[in-house]
Amino acid sequence: MEVQIFGIKKSADTRKALRFFSERRVKTHFVDLIERPASIGELRRFAQKFGVRALVDRDAKRFTDLGLQYAQLSDERWLEKLSEEPLLLRLPLVRNANLLVIGADEATWKSWMER
């Protein structure tokens, strides 16, 4: 099993995901979104399963700083904005082959381990 974790090093939930998998000796590929932003195609994969709104962290300081609480953007424009501004994402984004999770969801991660 190998998982891909998209996040930022300062995010507590991202660190929790990295620690969860490393403690279980699962090979991880970490993508720091500050150094290398997620592609729109990668974000679209998560959006197809959960919806674009699930990707947006409406409680993030960056969301308020940009004044997005009043924004009426199309799904495609949201994906572009999320690619440009990784601090707007609910983190971490975790992918195990075709299985996807947004946020720190240890119950789902454990179910992956049982497979």
Image: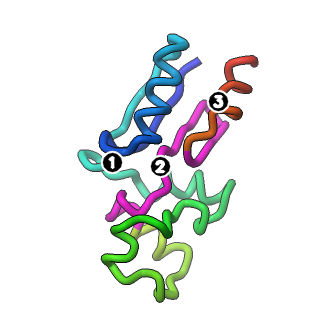
Under circle 2, the secondary element is loop
The residue at the far top in this view is: 25
Q: Mark number for residue 33? A: 1
Cα–Cα gap, marks 1 and 2:
10 Å
User: Could you tell me the amino acid type at mark 3?
Assistant: Trp
Q: Is residue 13 left or right of residue 35?
A: right
Residue under numbered circle 3: 109
The residue at 47%/32% (across/down) is: 16
Question: Would you say the residues marked 1 and 2 are in contact, meaning their CB atoms lie under 8 Å apart?
Answer: yes
Q: Earlier in the sequence, mark 2 or mark 3?
A: 2
Question: Would you say the residues marked 3 and 1 are in contact, meaning their CB atoms lie under 8 Å apart?
Answer: no
How far from the left and from the top, in percent, is residue 3? Answer: 53, 27
Q: Earlier in the sequence, mark 1 or mark 2?
A: 1
The residue at 64%/29% (across/down) is: 109
Cα–Cα gap, marks 3 and 1:
21 Å
Under circle 3, the secondary element is helix
The part of the image, by quadrant, that contains residue 15 is top left
The part of the image, by quadrant, that contains residue 95 is top right
Residue under numbered circle 2: 91
Q: Residues within 10 Å of mark 1 (few under 14, many from 20)?
A: many
- Above or below for 56 versus 92: below
Residue 88 magenta-highlighted:
yes
- Above or below for 30 versus 86: above
Q: Residues within 10 Å of mark 2 (few under 14, many from 20)?
A: many
